[in-house]
Image: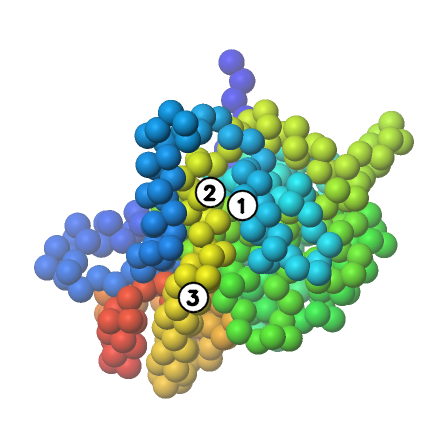
């Protein structure tokens, strides 16, 4: 019997379950304070599903109850009604066609599973701090060595993002094969300018690298000069894959629906010298390991693009961004240095002098009964920061602001 021993290299548990574990231990020890607890840790939406989405899902469930409109297995890549709606609403003028879109049940799964189509021995660049899924899935896939005492894995190229460099990772001075970029960024809440993305695309094309571009938070961009898609950048169709999700805009964290865009002219050279499109590999992988997102869920996702759906989603975004503005101000009023939260639902805050990330987590839990995410959980360069999620009710956010003022 052999197991995948790469799993043994993984350090702590996955960040968010680890936070949940610590919070549960605290609630058991403090039953009288549990009611006061406000969770601003994991970025999980709190507001109900838009009505347009619910109506579409209800109608789709009813269709499933009638033989004439019943749907069994759907196309693994997703129904045409949803793929078309995505192109017509998200990629107008960006030269993306519906058959370049693969519907799935989540971007977490897609950003992890994408490694299936890449071989061993690639050099992988990741920003630091970073969404932990990118690192952990590379560890599981055997693309790293062991972790050092800071939790940094041998073999990965870490691109530090901090206040000094404006949270903009430097382009590597060596050749890397895969580069993970996430904009608007989780966890720092910062964005990349068009010029910065142009530099990444130029680097990727010059080095035959592939950019894995996670745009799960694109709906939160408020500033019209900030690119929402890597495919706004000329040349990206030859070097980038983009991941998008309905989780945070449509409130689908519990419903599950996302999509990955792989342009058909994105190709790499196999060891045989043959040109292979990544689209064909992912199509093969998707059709083999996935049977498609459920029909009612895809109908619900398509309703995000109806007139009512768009208005309801805008209201949700406005709600969460209003929360982010309140949280930013409350932290600034306490004298803390704040980043992000203007084009993203995450506020990234420098810890007060003398307190580290987990120290701040403990302090917020003990003194304010507010759960935040320690920056170091996202990587060594996240040490000295913490993240507050604006996914919450307005009432809770206002209460968090009051408690911040009191500590
Ligand atoms: C986060 O809090 O970073 C996100 O909710 C994680 C995720 O989307 O999987």
First in sequence, mark 3 or 1: give its number: 1
The furthest residue to the left? 32
CB-based contact (under 8 Å), mark 1 and mark 2: yes
Q: How crowded is mark 2: few (under 14 residues within 10 Å), some or many (20 or more)?
A: many
Towards the viewer: 151 or 214: 214
Residue 341 in view of the camera? yes
Q: Which residue is drawn at 44% across and 29% down?
A: 71
How is colour applied across the structure in the image? rainbow
Mark 1: which secondary structure? helix
Q: Residue at x 76, y 65 (%)?
A: 198
The answer to which image quadrant residue 275 occupies is top right
First in sequence, mark 2 or 3: give its number: 2
- Determine whether the beta carbon of the residue marked 2 sits less than 8 angstroms from the nearest atom of ligand 1: no
Give left or right: position of 314 versus 61.
right
Residue 243 in view of the camera? no
Gap between marks 1 and 2, in whole Å? 7 Å
CB-based contact (under 8 Å), mark 3 and mark 1: no
Q: Residue at x 25, y 69 (%)?
A: 396
Residue at mark 1: 82
Mark 2: which secondary structure? helix
Give left or right: position of 290 versus 62.
right
Gap between marks 2 and 3, in whole Å? 19 Å
Residue at mark 3: 311
Mark 3: which secondary structure? helix
Q: Residue at x 47, y 77 (%)?
A: 338
- Determine whether the beta carbon of the residue marked 3 sits less than 8 angstroms from the nearest atom of ligand 1: no
First in sequence, mark 1 or 2: give its number: 1
Towards the viewer: 62 or 252: 62
Gap between marks 3 and 1, in whole Å? 18 Å
Residue at mark 2: 298
Q: How crowded is mark 1: few (under 14 residues within 10 Å), some or many (20 or more)?
A: many
């Amino acid at each position: 019997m052999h197991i995948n021993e790469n799993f043994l290299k993984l350090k702590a548990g996955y960040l968010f379950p680890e936070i949940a574990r610590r919070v549960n231990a605290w609630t058991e020890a403090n039953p009288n304070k549990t009611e006061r607890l406000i969770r601003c840790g994991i970025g999980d939406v709190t507001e109900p599903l838009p009505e347009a989405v619910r109506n579409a899902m209800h109608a789709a469930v009813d269709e499933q109850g009638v033989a004439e409109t019943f749907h069994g297995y759907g196309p693994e890549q997703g129904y045409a009604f949803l793929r078309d709606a995505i192109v017509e609403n998200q990629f107008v003028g960006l030269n993306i066609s519906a058959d370049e879109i693969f519907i799935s049940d989540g971007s977490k799964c897609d950003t992890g599973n994408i490694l299936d189509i890449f071989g061993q021995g690639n050099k992988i660049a990741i920003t630091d701090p970073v969404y932990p899924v990118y690192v952990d899935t590379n560890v599981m896939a055997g693309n790293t060595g062991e972790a050092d005492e800071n939790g940094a894995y041998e073999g990965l190229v870490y691109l530090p993002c901090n206040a000094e460099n404006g949270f903009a990772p430097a382009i590597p001075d060596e050749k890397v094969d895969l580069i993970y970029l996430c904009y608007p960024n989780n966890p720092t809440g910062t964005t990349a300018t068009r010029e910065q993305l142009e530099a990444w695309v130029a680097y990727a094309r010059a080095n035959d690298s592939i950019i894995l571009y996670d745009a799960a938070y694109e709906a939160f961009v408020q500033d019209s000069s900030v690119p929402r898609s890597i495919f706004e950048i000329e040349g990206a169709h030859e070097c980038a894959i983009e991941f998008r999700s309905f989780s945070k805009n449509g409130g689908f964290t519990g419903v599950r629906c996302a999509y990955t865009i792989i342009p058909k002219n994105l190709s790499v050279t196999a060891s045989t010298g043959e040109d292979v499109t990544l689209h064909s590999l992912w199509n093969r992988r998707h059709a083999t390991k996935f049977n498609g997102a459920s029909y009612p869920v895809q109908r619900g996702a398509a309703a995000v693009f109806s007139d009512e759906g768009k208005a309801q989603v805008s209201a949700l975004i406005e709600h969460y961004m209003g929360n982010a503005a309140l949280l930013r101000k409350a932290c600034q009023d306490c004298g803390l240095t704040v980043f992000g939260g203007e084009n993203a639902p995450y506020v990234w805050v420098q810890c007060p002098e003398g307190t580290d990330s987990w120290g701040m987590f403990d302090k917020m839990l003990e003194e304010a009964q507010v759960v935040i995410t320690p920056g170091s959980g996202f990587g060594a360069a996240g040490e000295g920061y913490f993240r507050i999620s604006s996914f919450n009710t307005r009432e809770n956010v206002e209460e968090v602001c009051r408690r911040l003022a009191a500590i």
